């Protein structure tokens, strides 16, 4: 398959990925794993697999008119998310119910049945296809206003301060290290942000020297990976994914402060460490990818939990870590690209990744709240450069702060303005400022 063909398939998949089943599976009243471009049931039975091209969005359960239309057009996809979107069926080898059951399914598609949890496999955020770095050569790059890029940097700065003040921000989840405690390296970075927030003309030298010493200590503690010539795609350290994430976050905080503070000496020192941060970020991604695809670190052990609440809590905690890895990867990568582009006028493409855009999921304060939201709405996993369907099917109020700020670097600023104008009179930069 050529790269062009692969991209065409992915473009089609992006339009239909939120539907519940292909047409043949729906008509046969069988489980469908919703794989694109062909589901496993159709492949195994050599059936022509196809999905309806019509998109239905935001129909809530309990809506009589939506229910009637859904009955009349059972083969059409819907963006209404139930817990069946969180899980896929694994009742047989091809991921479908045994067809010797007289056409009756043993689980409910519209709710989470604990008694049938053995039929559920991995949720969307633990599937291998969501851990791919996408590299897309665009013939016409998006037209992004310089003011939007500047506002992006201001948002990151405000988010780091918000982490200090509120214990959570769109970049760092409050429950990220609730079980293990905040790692020492990140505690130092936390303190550095607090110290930097009190910088003035009189103490500037001492404050920046403190941040430099903390950065040097972090690099010294990880000296085996300080050489930028180390293979970026091999992690020689026995660190867990959480430990990888902590040191990347800590180094990014020091780098962000020193690169954008305006202190020439600190900027020069930080520039020398940019390859190290890039290498650590690659090792973080490699670590979590291996956990998901090879080691099955976050596999189905939660399915054996008898209590539904414990099961939901396992899922929620796993999602927090996975989503935090994605957000840190994006912010580190985008920020370094912005700096190099500003300094040199050009930068090589480092790719982009999927992330969860649904408003409210990140801010859920409990596993029960998080699970209930997923039972009602699609989580909206998106890729910034492949998100036209998102603008067509949702409003700007359906996505969270992180998603808006991230999409501003992947979509034309004018398109973002038009999308925002559907629900508010604000311009992109003004909304970004309000969201930060």
Image (tube, rainbow, N blue to C red):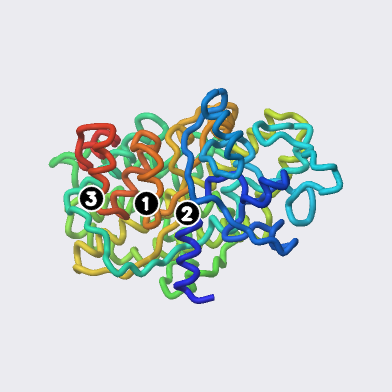
Residue that mark 2 sits on: 14
Expressed as whole percent of the image width and height from the top left, the position of residue 43 reads 69, 62
Ranked by sequence position, the earlier of labels 1 and 3 is 1
Query: Do labels 1 and 2 touch, CB within 8 Å?
Result: yes
Residue that mark 3 sits on: 413
Expressed as whole percent of the image width and height from the top left, the position of residue 121 reads 70, 47
Q: Quadrant of the C terminus?
A: top left
Residue that mark 1 sits on: 388
Camera-side residue of 420 and 129: 420
Please tell me which residue is depicted at 32% across the width and 67% down the height of the picture.
138
Secondary structure of the residue carrying numbered label 2 = helix
Does residue 123 appear in this view?
yes
Ranked by sequence position, the earlier of labels 1 and 2 is 2
Instruction: Tell me if 290 is positioned left or right of 278 in this view.
Output: right
Query: Do labels 1 and 3 touch, CB within 8 Å?
Result: no
Q: Quadrant of residue 417?
A: top left
Tell me if mark 1 has few (under 14), some (14-19) or many (20+) residues whose alpha carbon lies within 10 angstroms of its own. some
Expressed as whole percent of the image width and height from the top left, the position of residue 421 reads 24, 37
Please tell me which residue is depicted at 66% across the width and 52% down the height of the picture.
24
Q: Quadrant of the N terminus?
A: bottom right
Please tell me which residue is depicted at 48% across the width and 71% down the height of the picture.
5
Nearer mark to the viewer, of 3 and 2: 2
Camera-side residue of 329 and 44: 44
Please tell me which residue is depicted at 55% across the width and 45% down the height of the picture.
19
Expressed as whole percent of the image width and height from the top left, the position of residue 200 reads 16, 39
Camera-side residue of 106 and 361: 106
């Amino acid at each position: 398959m050529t790269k062009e063909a692969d991209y065409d398939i992915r473009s089609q998949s992006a339009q239909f990925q939120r539907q519940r089943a292909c047409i043949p599976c729906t008509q046969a009243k069988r489980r469908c794993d919703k794989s694109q471009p062909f589901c496993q049931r159709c492949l195994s039975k050599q059936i022509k697999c196809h999905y309806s091209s019509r998109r239905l969005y935001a129909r809530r359960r309990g809506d009589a008119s939506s229910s009637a239309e859904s009955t009349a057009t059972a083969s059409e996809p819907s963006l209404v998310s139930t817990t069946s979107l969180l899980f896929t069926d694994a009742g047989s080898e091809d991921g479908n119910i045994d067809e010797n059951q007289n056409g009756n399914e043993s689980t409910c598609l519209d709710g989470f049945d604990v008694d049938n949890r053995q039929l559920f496999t991995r949720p969307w955020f633990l599937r291998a296809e969501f851990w791919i770095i996408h590299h897309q050569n665009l013939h016409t790059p998006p037209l992004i206003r310089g003011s939007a890029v500047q506002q992006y940097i201001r948002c990151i700065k405000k988010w780091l301060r918000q982490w200090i003040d509120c214990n959570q921000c769109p970049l760092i989840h409050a429950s990220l290290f609730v079980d293990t405690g905040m790692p020492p390296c990140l505690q130092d970075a936390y303190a550095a942000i607090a110290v930097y927030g009190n910088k003035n003309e009189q103490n500037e030298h001492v404050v920046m020297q403190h941040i430099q010493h903390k950065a040097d200590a972090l690099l010294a503690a990880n000296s085996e990976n300080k050489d930028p010539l180390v293979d970026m795609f091999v992690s020689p350290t026995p660190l867990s994914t959480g430990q990888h994430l902590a040191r990347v976050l800590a180094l990014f905080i020091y780098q962000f402060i020193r690169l954008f503070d305006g202190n020439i000496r600190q900027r020069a020192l930080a520039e020398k460490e940019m390859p190290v941060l890039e290498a650590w970020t690659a090792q973080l991604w490699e670590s979590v990818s291996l956990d998901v695809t090879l080691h099955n670190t976050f596999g189905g052990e939660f399915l054996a939990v008898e209590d539904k609440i414990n099961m939901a809590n396992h899922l929620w905690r796993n999602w927090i870590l996975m989503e935090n890895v994605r957000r840190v990867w994006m912010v580190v990568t985008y920020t370094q690209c912005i700096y190099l582009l500003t300094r040199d006028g050009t930068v090589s493409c480092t790719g982009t990744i999927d992330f969860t855009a649904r408003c409210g999921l990140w801010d859920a304060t409990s596993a029960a709240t998080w699970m209930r939201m997923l039972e009602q709405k699609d989580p909206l996993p998106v890729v910034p450069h492949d998100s036209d369907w998102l603008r067509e099917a949702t409003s700007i109020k359906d996505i969270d702060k992180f998603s808006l700020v991230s999409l501003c670097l992947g979509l034309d600023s004018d398109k973002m303005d038009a999308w925002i104008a559907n629900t508010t009179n604000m311009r992109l930069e003004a909304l970004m400022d309000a969201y930060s």
